[in-house]
Image (tube, coloured by chain):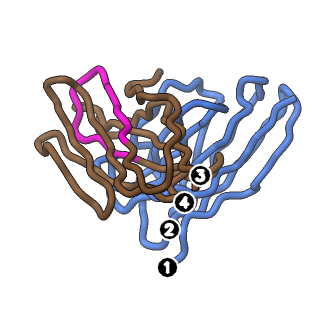
Chain colours: A blue, B brown
């Protein structure tokens, strides 16, 4: 069974640029959630995708957007990067809709905005 | 915003001792989950306790939930150096099950 993978591992971008982060969910999982974790803080929920549709969103501006593909992999896109977007971005997959079930996390993408 | 707050923020114990971490939250929940994170990497799910449950065990882990006090505790018995990590509680809020909200975590250090 393949676990959740994310790419790239690290990324450095300049303020104002756009970035795309990728996530491959665990085999058999149809739900992907994205989280932002600032240094020293707990993860904050960005949004969740279930079968290619957005299935819930946290308190993040529209410049944070996502996609889920037919194979259930997912992308997180962030436009007009700000310094405060520097964080660890985590994706998590599960085989159930919603959040009442165990989630399997990837290792994260460390984004630095300069 | 953080729904759950862990206490203490940091905990240092000797190998073999028990470690207890507490979590308080603000609103009604569907379930509460505990996760472990090693050195800023991905989170590992430890245990999920539903709002109608009071206690759950998994190996050396024991979790309690008191919905009247809106609090939970995680007990790790006979700790090992490999238990050194950050521990987070996360709540799935009633009426908004898609929103999993994490606390700010407890950094546990187990000294050999």
User: Are marks 1 and 2 in one subunit?
Assistant: yes
Element marked by disc 4: helix
Q: Which residues are magenta?
A: B20-34
Q: Is residue B83 magenta?
A: no
Find the distance from the CA under tag 1 to the CA under tag 3: 22 Å
Viewer-nearest of discs 1 and 3 = 3
Find the distance from the CA under tag 2 to the CA under tag 4: 25 Å
Find the distance from the CA under tag 3 to the CA under tag 2: 20 Å
Q: Are marks 1 and 2 in contact (CB under 8 Å)?
A: yes
Q: Is residue A73 above or below residue B37?
A: below
What's the residue at 22%, 42% (across, down)? B64
Q: Is residue B32 magenta?
A: yes
What's the residue at 33%, 60% (across, down)? B60
Viewer-nearest of discs 1 and 4 = 4
User: Are marks 3 and 2 in one subunit?
Assistant: no
Q: Is residue A33 left or right of residue B46?
A: right
Q: Residue A26 bears which disc, if any?
A: 2
Task: State the image coordinates of residue B75 (x, y, percent, origin top left).
Answer: 32, 46
Q: Splitting the image into 4 quarters, where does residue B77 fall?
A: bottom left
What's the residue at 29%, 41% (across, down)? B32
What residue is pinned by disc 4?
B82
Q: Residue A1 bears which disc, if any?
A: 1
Q: Residue B38 bears which disc, if any?
A: 3
Q: Main secondary structure of the magenta part?
A: strand
Viewer-nearest of discs 2 and 4 = 4
Q: Residues within 10 Å of mark 2 (few under 14, many from 20)?
A: many
Task: State the image coordinates of residue B27 (x, y, percent, origin top left).
Answer: 26, 22
Q: Residues within 10 Å of mark 1 (few under 14, many from 20)?
A: few
Q: Is residue B100 left or right of residue A24?
A: left
The chain letter under disc 3 is: B
């Amino acid at each position: 069974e393949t676990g959740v993978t994310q790419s790239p591992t690290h990324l450095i971008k300049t303020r104002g640029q756009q970035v795309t982060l990728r996530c491959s969910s665990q085999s058999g999982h149809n739900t992907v959630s994205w989280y932002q974790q600032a240094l020293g803080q707990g993860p904050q929920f960005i949004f969740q995708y279930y079968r290619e549709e957005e299935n819930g969103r946290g308190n993040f501006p529209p410049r944070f957007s996502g996609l889920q593909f037919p194979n259930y992999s997912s992308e997180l896109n962030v436009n007009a990067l700000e310094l405060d977007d520097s964080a660890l971005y985590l994706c998590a997959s599960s085989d159930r809709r919603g959040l009442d079930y165990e989630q399997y996390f990837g290792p994260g993408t460390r984004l630095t905005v300069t | 915003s953080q729904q759950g707050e862990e206490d203490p923020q940091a905990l240092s114990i000797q190998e073999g001792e028990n470690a207890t971490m507490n979590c308080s939250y603000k609103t009604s929940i569907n379930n509460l989950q505990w996760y472990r994170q090693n050195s800023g990497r991905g989170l590992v799910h430890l245990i999920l306790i539903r709002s109608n449950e009071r206690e759950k065990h998994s190996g050396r882990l024991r979790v309690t939930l008191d919905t009247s006090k809106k609090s939970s505790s995680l007990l790790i018995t006979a700790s090992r150096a490999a238990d050194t990590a950050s521990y987070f509680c996360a709540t799935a809020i009633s009426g908004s099950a898609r929103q999993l909200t994490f606390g700010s975590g407890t950094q546990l250090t187990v000294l050999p």
